[in-house]
Structures are given as structure tokens and as C-alpha cells.
């Protein structure tokens, strides 16, 4: 049987093609997110193992400084890439920043990638780091956008601003009520800034 018109011009076929494409794209996104969640959880566990080893007194002063470097070398030999000295330092910091006893809201988010967390772990101030983490989640910032906002000192500009209502729109982000409270805005500033978005 020969078709009088090409299948690709049939409306039903185009709908089928779109449905399959959408399903595949959504599945890919969920798979990436699941891998990301597992990766961050694994890195958190690696950080936990390092910290617990250090705290148990198993690291003697004479080789304590070499622990991360030695682990990097040995884990690299066993597992390949991903265990550079810098990455191990960040895994340790991830555990310390999100260790047990913290509220569940302060656990790593499945919406952010390891690269997001590496950037956030570079910030010493927990309020500032929490602000950028919340904004990255809420606004779905890419890593380059997060770096741009950090380089532009969005947190400090918002905290120091006299025109608190004007900065969120000029920064391209919506500052929600909890973030506004975190940086010390008054009730009237929060209401003016967040009326439409919160």
C-alpha cells in the first residue's frame, strides 16, 4: 500500500512525534535529576567519612595535612576522575555545611547540581550562602548565572540597599519573603518588594 501523502505531513503523525519527543525529553530530565541527587548524596557521604576519620583522632599531626592529597591519589587510582584534591575538599565542606542536626530545609537540594554547590561552598558567610542557594533554586539559575549574581554581589547590594523594592527587578530575580527577612528587611520593605511575587 502506497501513501498518497508523506507521513511527516500528517497531523496525527506530527502529534505522535511531538508526544514521543516530549516524553523522551521529560524522561531525560528526570534521569539527570536522579543521577544528580545520587551524586550529591554520595559526595556528602564521602565528606562524612573524611570528617569522621579526622574527628576520631585517626589523623596524626605528622600526616594530617596529607590526608586529602593521599586520598585524592589513591581514590583516583581506584576510581578514575572525580577525586581531585579540590573536589575532596568540597565534599568535606558539603558535609560540614549540611551535617546532621540542621533543619531539613538546610539539606542539599535536588534542584541544584554539584557545580552549584561548589560555587556556594566558596562563600564563608552562611546567610549569604543560604541566600544564593535559595535564589538559585527559586529562580532556577544556571551555574553561570549563579556566578554572575555572586560576582555582582547581589546579596550585599540587597542588604545595603535603601531602595529595596528596586533591586530585585533590576537584578532579574524575585526576592521572596524568607530571603528578605534573612537579610534584615523590614516588614514594609518586604511588603513593597514582594507584594506581587510572594
Image (spheres, grey):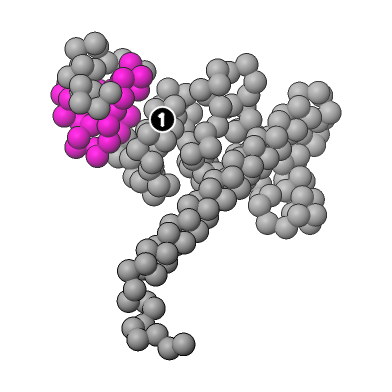
Q: Is residue 171 magenta?
A: yes
Boundaries of the magenta span:
154-181
- Give the quadrant of residue 131: top left
Pointer 1 residue: 134
In the displayed structure, does residue 39 sit left or right of residue 189?
Answer: right
Q: Work out whether residue 161 can be spotted.
A: no
- Give the quadrant of residue 170: top left
- Give the quadrant of residue 95: top right
Local packing at callout 1 (Cα closer than 10 Å; few below 14, some 14-19, many 20+) is some
Where's residue 56, x and y in %? 81, 23
In the displayed structure, does residue 152 sit left or right of residue 143?
Answer: left
* Residue visible at 62% across and 16% down in the picture: 101
Q: How many numbered callouts?
A: 1
Where's residue 154, x and y in %? 30, 33
Query: What quarter of the picture does the C terminus occupy?
Result: top left
Judge by depth and name the residue closer to the eye, 100 or 57: 100
Judge by depth and name the residue closer to the eye, 65 or 155: 155
Where's residue 88, x and y in %? 66, 42
* Residue visible at 17% across and 19% down in the picture: 192
Q: Is the magenta region chiefly helix, strand or loop?
A: helix
In the displayed structure, does residue 72 sit left or right of residue 1?
Answer: right
In the displayed structure, does residue 38 sit left or right of residue 172?
Answer: right
Amino acid at each position: 500500500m502506497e501513501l498518497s501523502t508523506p507521513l511527516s505531513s500528517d497531523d496525527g503523525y506530527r502529534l505522535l512525534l511531538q508526544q514521543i519527543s516530549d516524553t523522551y525529553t521529560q524522561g531525560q530530565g528526570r534521569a539527570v535529576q536522579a543521577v544528580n541527587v545520587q551524586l550529591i548524596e554520595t559526595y556528602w557521604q564521602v565528606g562524612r567519612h573524611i570528617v569522621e576519620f579526622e574527628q576520631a583522632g585517626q589523623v596524626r599531626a605528622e600526616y594530617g595535612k596529607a590526608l586529602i592529597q593521599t586520598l585524592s591519589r589513591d581514590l583516583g587510582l581506584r576510581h578514575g576522575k572525580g577525586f581531585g584534591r579540590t573536589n575532596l575538599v568540597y565534599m568535606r565542606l558539603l558535609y560540614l555545611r549540611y551535617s546532621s542536626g540542621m533543619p531539613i530545609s538546610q539539606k542539599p537540594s535536588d534542584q541544584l547540581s554539584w557545580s552549584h554547590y561548589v560555587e556556594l561552598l566558596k562563600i564563608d558567610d552562611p546567610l549569604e550562602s543560604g541566600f544564593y542557594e535559595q535564589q538559585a533554586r527559586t529562580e532556577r539559575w544556571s551555574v553561570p548565572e549563579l556566578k554572575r549574581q555572586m560576582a555582582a554581589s547581589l546579596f550585599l547590594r540587597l542588604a545595603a540597599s535603601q531602595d529595596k523594592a528596586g533591586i530585585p527587578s533590576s537584578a532579574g530575580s524575585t526576592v521572596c519573603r524568607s530571603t528578605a527577612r534573612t537579610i534584615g528587611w523590614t516588614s514594609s520593605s518586604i511588603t513593597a518588594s514582594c507584594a506581587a511575587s510572594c
